[in-house]
Image (spheres, grey):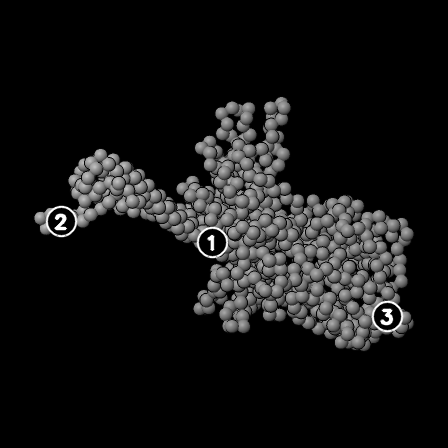
Amino acid sequence: MPREHEHIEDIGIRSNGRRPRMDSGATPAMVDFDRADIAEHLGWVFRGQRGYFAVGLLDRRTAKMTERVYTSVGAMQRGVTAAARNDEGAIEVFYCPLPLSTADRAKGNSASRWLVWVDIDKPLSDALRDTLKRWGFRLVASGTPGRLHAYARLDRGVTLDEHRAIQEALAKQFNGDPALVSDNALLRVPDTTNYKNHPNVKADKRNDQPYPVRILVRGKRQVDTAWLMKQLSIDLTKPVATTRVITGEWNRVPVPLRLPDIIRQYMFTEEEDVEDRSEASYAAICACAEATARDGSRLLTLDQIHAVLENYGPGVAKYNGRWHKHINEVYAKWQSKGVQAVEPWTGIEGFWERRPVLTHISRYAKAHRLGPWGLLGCVLVRVVTSIPPHVKLPDDGSLNLYLGLVGLPGAGKGRTINHAAKVVELGKILPEPVSIGTGQGIPHLFKRRLKDGSIETHSVSALFVTPEIDDYVSLTKGEGSNLDPTLRSAWVGESIGGSYADPTKRLPVPAHSYRLCWIMGIQPDHAQPLLARVTGGTPQRFLWLPVYDGDMPDVRPPSPGVWDASQDIVGPDEMGVPDSIMAAIDADQVARDRKVAKKQPEDPFEAQGRFGRWKVAAAFALLDRRTAVSEDDWNLAGVVYEVSKRVRGDIQQRGEELADKMAAIRGVQEAKKQQAMTDQLRRTSVSKCMDAVVRKLTTLGDWMAAGKLRVAIGGSRYSKEDFAEALARLLKAGKVEKRDTEYNGQRGTSWRIKS
């Protein structure tokens, strides 16, 4: 098994004394999930996917099925192998081929769906068997003679409706068991053994000679999903009949992993499971509201209650489109009893545990010696780059996102960018990163002019990657450069490319018709030219995230592999945003306008703060494959922006300290320069003074008092200090003689040329 799977924990055992819906049969004399065929098969089935992995352990002695759920494939391998050894080979093992969203193996709870299968419970004709081989299916002998499990690994993740349609069509065409088409089915594991001698098998069908479960045909690495659906005559353009109204608004709002059983069961309760739908719905809402954590605090926020009860069968059936409104009404009545609502999480503590994908990114960063914040930033940029440009925030808010990766030389900025493509699989081919050029060149990333003069759109998405900020600085130095204003316009999704006076050179790109994101490496000591553009608004448009990690462990942990975020996102062009967030953004705009009107000072770096945070919140929603921003997305984005603000503030402070240091250095250098100039002038003056003294004393040929000598050579032309220095040097050189004199009680000196 590849080592990218990390053993996290066995999160629990559930034994209900009943056999789950599964293919009939049993398994090995001694199960070892580390055997090559088992490991290869599990790697092929679950490659790159994250979630909860369920197995069923059937005790052949009692026919009792116990289910276990693991948080990684590696944990499942080790746990099942250990369980088999403890039970001395008396268990048979089944597994769910799809990872689950939570620890419950319930219908519709799969986290992702990259695999389809059919449990063929009747002898298959040679023609049908050849069809499966030709289509690229993996064929596994399930143990009972003539029976097969046929698997296909798809080239993309499919929706629940698509998965159900493919499963049912396969079962119909290939004589499959209709009871094993749901996404929570349990199947036998290849390279194990099928026994027919446990108590639930009729006596005349028991067999003490086991049948091997083995791979017959390995099949293709992946099968084209659209092609397969066409072969099966599946048409999902028609509405899928359903008895439920699925709004999708609360899809994947993060909820605690360990919910009490009484709460968790509501997530999968069917309409027919209760007699009084109205009473059951009221009780479910109140139970969720009253649920408490271990410390006695409320367990669920209102948003999380909506998420838990999103598909609560009795409520959806009873209230239809008013179900979530009814939840709000009941919750308000419950609150009116004096119980306080749960305060939403807003702090930085526990950030990386808020969602499984964040935990995954953090663990991946530590495993590859990367900074988690920088890696997260790159992932969010890639997520936004993968989204079509027509998807926007309300009020024509563009999603275009700019990221500054902050780190010293050699800190791993380039590695962080490269690993962002490996840590999360988006299931889409992103545009190749391009280097930044001129502002005039940006429209050419999306449009080109043909020979007949018409303009053609050749791309709608681009990703700038600038490894060093110095490249950007050099491109924006010239007075004629329009790179900065073009990039600022692109960040808000405005039209670009229409500024040429010559209409034949214009390449107008309409607003919100393109997606442009940018990642730039920033060395802290080289960031001042970017920060200096604050009045234009360029540095405010960046997220500033570090590529370093002060909590890096001494021992490198194993890599968790790839997070699967390849599910298609279906939703309106305008992303949904809660009223509370819109109100906060609106209030911030009003406050800023009033400050400007009153000429009150404000931090210019915060000018785009709310809008930038909004973009990041949208990126978090899209990473969860949602088109509706939640309160939790907004809170997560607030933490990211707080980190960005601190990093940028540290760079500003570092820049100010560096500027002071450089000013001090320049001051010392200037002082030294001035002193050197003064010293040179004095040396010149002393030299001239020496020449004048020698000439005068040579001409005189006798003693002369020092005072008269200074007057005779020019007086004030030479300072007293220079004159004294000149006489001292001449005396030391033996060119003049000196004698002490006294006149009227005043002591002095006289000088003459030395003969």
Residue identifier under label 1: 647
The residue lying toward the viewer, choosing from 596 and 329, is: 596
Q: Residue at x 66, y 44 (%)?
A: 429
Residue linked to disc 2: 742
Q: Earlier in the sequence, mark 3 or mark 1?
A: 3
Residue 69: percent from the left, percent from the top?
Answer: 69, 67
| Whole-percent x, y for residue 570 in the image | 62, 48
Q: Image point 62% across, 62% down: which residue? A: 556
Q: Say whether marks 1 and 2 touch (CB < 8 Å).
A: no
Question: As drawn, is 290 to the left or to the right of 183?
Answer: left
Residue beneath disc 3: 196
Q: Callout 2: few (<14), some (14-19), or many (20+) C-alpha neighbours within 10 Å?
A: few
Relative vertical location of residue 87 with respect to residue 136 in this rendering, above or below: below
Circle 1 Cα neighbour tier, 10 Å, few/some/many (<14 / 14–19 / ≥20): some
Q: Nearer the viewer, mark 1 or mark 2?
A: 2
Q: Earlier in the sequence, mark 1 or mark 2?
A: 1
User: Residue 194 is drawn in which quadrant?
Assistant: bottom right
Where, quadrant-wise, is the N terminus in this rendering? bottom right
Q: What secondary structure is marked by label 3?
A: loop
Instruction: Give the quadrant of residue 196.
Output: bottom right
Choose between 490 and 684: the one closer to the eye: 684
Residue at disc 2, secondary structure: strand
Q: Quadrant of the C terminus?
A: top left
Secondary structure of the residue carrying tag 1 is helix
Q: CA distance from mark 1 to mark 2?
A: 77 Å
The crowding category of the residue bearing disc 3, from other C-alpha atoms within 10 Å (few below 14, some 14 to 19, many at least 20), is many
